[in-house]
Image (cartoon, coloured by chain):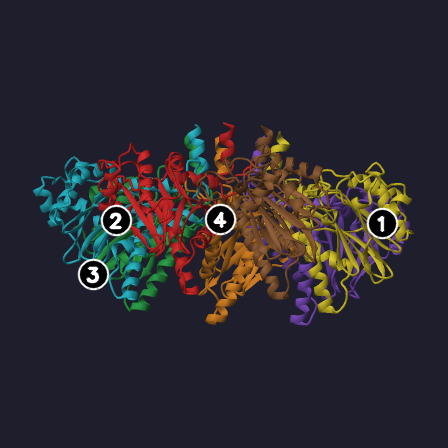
Chain colours: A orange, B purple, C yellow, D brown, E red, F cyan, G green
Amino acid sequence: MQGQAQQQAYDRGITIFSPDGRLYQVEYAREAVKRGTASIGIRTEGGVVLAVDKRIRSELMERTSVEKIHKADDHIGIASAGHVADARQLIDFARQQTQVNRLRYGEPIGVETLTKEVTDHIQQYTQVGGARPFGVALIIGGIEDGEPRLYETDPSGTPYEWKALAVGADRGEIQEYLEDNYSEAMDLDGGIELALRALGSVNDDELSPEGVGIATIDAESEQFMELTNDETEEYLSELELLGGGDDETEPEE
Amino acid sequence: MQGQAQQQAYDRGITIFSPDGRLYQVEYAREAVKRGTASIGIRTEGGVVLAVDKRIRSELMERTSVEKIHKADDHIGIASAGHVADARQLIDFARQQTQVNRLRYGEPIGVETLTKEVTDHIQQYTQVGGARPFGVALIIGGIEDGEPRLYETDPSGTPYEWKALAVGADRGEIQEYLEDNYSEAMDLDGGIELALRALGSVNDDELSPEGVGIATIDAESEQFMELTNDETEEYLSELELLGGGDDETEPEE
Amino acid sequence: MQGQAQQQAYDRGITIFSPDGRLYQVEYAREAVKRGTASIGIRTEGGVVLAVDKRIRSELMERTSVEKIHKADDHIGIASAGHVADARQLIDFARQQTQVNRLRYGEPIGVETLTKEVTDHIQQYTQVGGARPFGVALIIGGIEDGEPRLYETDPSGTPYEWKALAVGADRGEIQEYLEDNYSEAMDLDGGIELALRALGSVNDDELSPEGVGIATIDAESEQFMELTNDETEEYLSELELLGGGDDETEPEE
Amino acid sequence: MQGQAQQQAYDRGITIFSPDGRLYQVEYAREAVKRGTASIGIRTEGGVVLAVDKRIRSELMERTSVEKIHKADDHIGIASAGHVADARQLIDFARQQTQVNRLRYGEPIGVETLTKEVTDHIQQYTQVGGARPFGVALIIGGIEDGEPRLYETDPSGTPYEWKALAVGADRGEIQEYLEDNYSEAMDLDGGIELALRALGSVNDDELSPEGVGIATIDAESEQFMELTNDETEEYLSELELLGGGDDETEPEE
Amino acid sequence: MQGQAQQQAYDRGITIFSPDGRLYQVEYAREAVKRGTASIGIRTEGGVVLAVDKRIRSELMERTSVEKIHKADDHIGIASAGHVADARQLIDFARQQTQVNRLRYGEPIGVETLTKEVTDHIQQYTQVGGARPFGVALIIGGIEDGEPRLYETDPSGTPYEWKALAVGADRGEIQEYLEDNYSEAMDLDGGIELALRALGSVNDDELSPEGVGIATIDAESEQFMELTNDETEEYLSELELLGGGDDETEPEE
Amino acid sequence: MQGQAQQQAYDRGITIFSPDGRLYQVEYAREAVKRGTASIGIRTEGGVVLAVDKRIRSELMERTSVEKIHKADDHIGIASAGHVADARQLIDFARQQTQVNRLRYGEPIGVETLTKEVTDHIQQYTQVGGARPFGVALIIGGIEDGEPRLYETDPSGTPYEWKALAVGADRGEIQEYLEDNYSEAMDLDGGIELALRALGSVNDDELSPEGVGIATIDAESEQFMELTNDETEEYLSELELLGGGDDETEPEE
Amino acid sequence: MQGQAQQQAYDRGITIFSPDGRLYQVEYAREAVKRGTASIGIRTEGGVVLAVDKRIRSELMERTSVEKIHKADDHIGIASAGHVADARQLIDFARQQTQVNRLRYGEPIGVETLTKEVTDHIQQYTQVGGARPFGVALIIGGIEDGEPRLYETDPSGTPYEWKALAVGADRGEIQEYLEDNYSEAMDLDGGIELALRALGSVNDDELSPEGVGIATIDAESEQFMELTNDETEEYLSELELLGGGDDETEPEE
């Protein structure tokens, strides 16, 4: 009961500190991230892999409208998890930053620079009153000076750099799978396979090509590319993960 | 009791996260959508069909004043469900976007573009304080590059693309009917019939021509058109759904 | 007790959704409408009839100061019910719209156009914080393209078109009377008689000429006109509704 | 207890509707009016009479500083009851309107026009947040087109026209006295006598010349004039109402 | 307990009406006035006398820093009681008004005009949100057209004119003393003596010259002047009120 | 319990009056002053002495960073007690005033003038919403027209002039000591000795040179000067107050 | 229970004083600092040492993304502890100040000047409403006029100067260790060793080179430099603190 009452005290109005120094609205926003289906990012020697769970609510819904992988610039892709409408706002913000950078400096924006511009934007919504935090986490991957880079932005506005990470539903399990199986010496192919096996590990090792989204940013070409359904199916079949298309479940809101 | 108290904590002031990461005001706005009579959208090879339940409160009320189907541009129609006054605001916003697009780019706006401009507008009302979310869902259908497209906007500001969908009262039942009976190979006629049968399925298979609104956007002509009462009656009689006009019930507020 | 507590949670600050998707401040504003004396609108082939109950608090009060029928333009009249001071604001707003239309387009405003400009104005007060909704309903009647039109605006900002309707106290009973006795083929005279009989039905079939206000907008002349007391008395005596002048009661606030 | 809790729910922040459609802050402002000493207005064929109770807190207070009768323009006077500081604001507002009218149109403002400009101003304070309603009622009397006119403004911002009325303390009793004794055929003298007898009726039929303020606006001269103490004494002595000067009581705040 | 709860309901946010029509924040501000030491104003034929209790917290405090008598203009003085910091704001405001008047009209401001400009300023702080009322009462005395005038401003923003008055601590007793002993035919000397005797009446008839502040505005010279300690001592000794300097007590905050 | 509840009622939002006329937020700010270590000001014939307790939290903290004595201008020094970060804001404000005065009038600002500019600034934070009061008290000492002057500003924004005073922790005891031992005929040396003895009186008569800060503003040179540790040590040893350096305690926050 | 209730009363809206003169939101922000891993600053004769605990959540996270040591200018470094996203805001602010100083004055900013510009910025967020305090503490070290200087900024906006200090988790223990072992006569090498031993004292005397960040600002070169992993490993091995890399724990949020 007491915990109940205590929590309520920090839910109103603006984002303020609790007696133990936590920002409850930010922590609740992290719960919103967990309500979204999983997204995975893996950094390999050959580039960055982004993989997302695209489960849908109804077979009549177009899977293409489940936008969880976004191209931010030629050399940068973003995977999101959590509150979809919030994600769109941040993606728009990120795209503006990449364009401004090209206009102002005549060159593509660095992955770290972009990440920090996004997290600084997120932070403002956690300190200044009159708005709520963003209920979304982003995985920002790309090539900077020829090197693959992989970042996470969380609802507090903190940037983290990763070798491989998961956000959204089942984060704990997938992250554990990644830690057990990740090796730095993978190429892009190996990254895609690790991502799919990680996603499979929390789906009874059955995935449909349509229920999964895969994108890569190749370290050499420095180009963002999305896999076609056929390409995805080939990987799944090779990995013996190919399952029925019956994956409708209650999706993220 | 506890759930009761917990809920109340998230109802005040602005739209904030609950401990489990939900935005209660947005979820309550979804309830406002369910309080409205049903609207249906169906994408066929021949174009898009919009169909709405136009039940009225009193036989003295003009059915034409139950505005649930709106022409947004020559090639785009919108069906709404939920809080009527809110719907008017969003429709006005959508119409401005279509006009701005024609002025600025000299060509009709894309259906997806329009949908996302509307959902981004909706999202603002869920994050920035000083206003409540929109209590309405829109079905936006139209022709883009010769292809029929069908989208939904919900109170969270998320855009979804659909083959066929229902919003408003009885959404669950109608959506199930659509899933059981939808086939992609339908023409416009087939779409109209499916829509009417779906509406009939939650109305004891009896509909009056006046109690139903039908509009199509033909894939070839790319023109929004509304069916006359006579045309609707013909369909209903053919489908053996023609019922008495005694359909006054407590309508959406 | 629980209902009590639940209600209180939605009364504070701004107009927000309740868990079942309702806007309590808007519903309370509807109660304010019911606290006002009744107003009636009837559409006939010959034009529109507006009729209002003008009960007063004291015989020393001038009945002319009970302003419930307002001329918005030559061809449009408005009857109101509810919070009198709020009604004045909306009437002023409506009159500005009619004048702007004449100035800008050189022609009288359409009845539907005017209604929607008023309801869009009302809607703003239900969504954006810092103000309460309007506690008033308007019946807007007039001639558009030679055709009589009759609309209602309610506190949610929804426009409805009617053949005949009542707002304010005893709305339920009067509306029922109208439904039982309305026929589209009436002329203005018939409309006046129906309105008076409807008002009489909730006043023991006794009305005083001073206690009733009647206005018409003739479909041919397209002119708003108010009946004199003598004219009203003639109708009442013909209808055997002529009662004593002893009608002081607690009026609307 | 429940009523207690319910009331508290509507007292905070801004002026909002209660579940039964009332604006509590406005109703409480009406209580503030009742806390002020009585003011009376009477319309006669010969002009308008304003009469006020000028009781004071201490014999050392100057009665002239109890400002309850105000000249708004040559042809318009205003009597107030309630929160004195609020009254001053509205009187200032009214005087500005009279001057603006003379400047803009080159003629004196109409009594009804002035009243409605004041009530529209009052209404704003009951709908838009960030301020409280005015805790004062005004009686506005004057000559318009040669005719005496008498209006009331209340805290909701509603204008009423009257033949005779009382506001402030003992409103109920005095109004009843006026209803029993008013006749339209009075001249100014008769109006002054009725006002004094009405005031006496709630003061044990004893009034002091200093404790009463009287002003008239003559229908012919169209001039606002205040009675001197000697003139008032003459009336009181004639009416056998002349009492001791011992009238100090707790005055309006 | 109930009264307790009721009070709390009106303490928050802005100045709003209680169910019985009172403005609690204004009434609490009046309590702040009572927490200040007493100030007295007396109007005589020869001019106005202002007298204040200058008790101090510690003998090490400079009595001159207890500013309770202020010169507003050559011909106007102001005595204050209550919240000292608030008084300074109002005195500054008053001085600006006197200067503006001299600049704009080339003549000294009237005492009544100045008082009303101050009270209108005070009223704003009781109606518009975002600030609290002023916790101070002023006695404004001066010469206008050769006549002595004496006014009070209270926290509600009401102006009162007086022959003689007290504000602050012991107001009730001192006012009673003034009522028993005031006569209009006094000269300035008589006014000073009455003020000192009144102050003595609540101080065991013992006052120290330093513990009292006296100022006069002579009706002939129209000049504000403060008495020196020696002059005050002479009066006290003549009146047999001269007491020890041991008057430190808990002063107004 | 009741006191508890009552207090809570006045803690929220803005600075408002309690039923007994107090401003709780201001009184709480006074508690913040008491949480700071003591500061003392003494006015002598030879000038003003400022003395402060510079206790530190850890021996690793630099005592010079305990800024409690500040030079505002050549001829004015300020000692502070209470919330350190707030003190810095007021000191900055004061320094701007001294500079503006020199620029605008070409001469040093008066001590009283400076004090009142600071207190008027402080008062604003106690009346207008959106900010909290300053949790700090200042002792402002300097030379004006050749005369030493000593002032206090408290969190309410009231200016007091003193011969000698203490603020901060142990104010009561130190002030008592000053009252018992102060004499106006001291020179600067005597002032320094009194200040140190007063500080010693609440520290077991043991002070370290580093734990004490001393500044003087000489009446002749009109120059602010701080004592070196050696000079302070000399005084302490002469006064037999020289104690060990072991004075770390929980300092002001 | 009572403490519980009391605390809740000060958590809402803006940063206000509690009855005992504390600013709870600031104190809660201090708790946020303690939730971050430890950071240490040590001033030696040879320059300043900054050392931070860089524990990570997962072995897949890049330690370089745990940004706790920042270069503010050539001659100034900053170590942070607490809410990471807030730290970034303050670091950005600090860097702008250093650049502005170079542009405006053509010389590097002083360490004390920079610290106070940062603390004044922090203070604003504790006094003016509409935002929460910064949940971060900074250690600012650098060279000023050839002298090493070391400062702390805390969430209240108070600047402290130190010889050696710790902030963040285990502050108490580490500070104690520093007090027991610090000597002013250390060179940079000695400072690094003390910092590592202090960090080791709360980590079972086992540290990994990757889990620790070290930076120095040399008094002679006046250059900020970060140690490489190899350099750190050398120190650790020399100090017999070299432990396994198994340091993943729940990091600061």
Residue type (three-letter) at the residue carrying disc 2: Tyr
Instruction: Say if mark 1 contacts mark 3, CB within 8 Å.
Output: no
Q: Which residue is mark 4?
A: E123
The secondary structure type at the circle numbered 2 is: strand
Are callouts 1 and 2 both on one chain?
A: no
Q: Is residue D49 left or right of residue B143?
A: left
Instruction: Say if mark 3 contacts mark 2, CB within 8 Å.
Output: no
Mark sitting on residue G146: 3
- Specify the subunit that label 1 lies on: C
Are callouts 3 and 2 both on one chain?
A: no
Mark sitting on residue C230: 1
Q: Which residue is mark 2?
A: F151
Q: Is residue D41 left or right of residue D88?
A: right
Residue type (three-letter) at the residue carrying disc 3: Gly
The N terminus of chain D, quarter of image:
top right
Q: Residues within 10 Å of mark 4 (few under 14, many from 20)?
A: many
Mark in front: 4 vs 2: 4
Residue type (three-letter) at the residue carrying disc 4: Gln
Mark sitting on residue A164: none
Q: Give the alpha-carbon distance from disc 1 to disc 2, as whole Å.
A: 82 Å
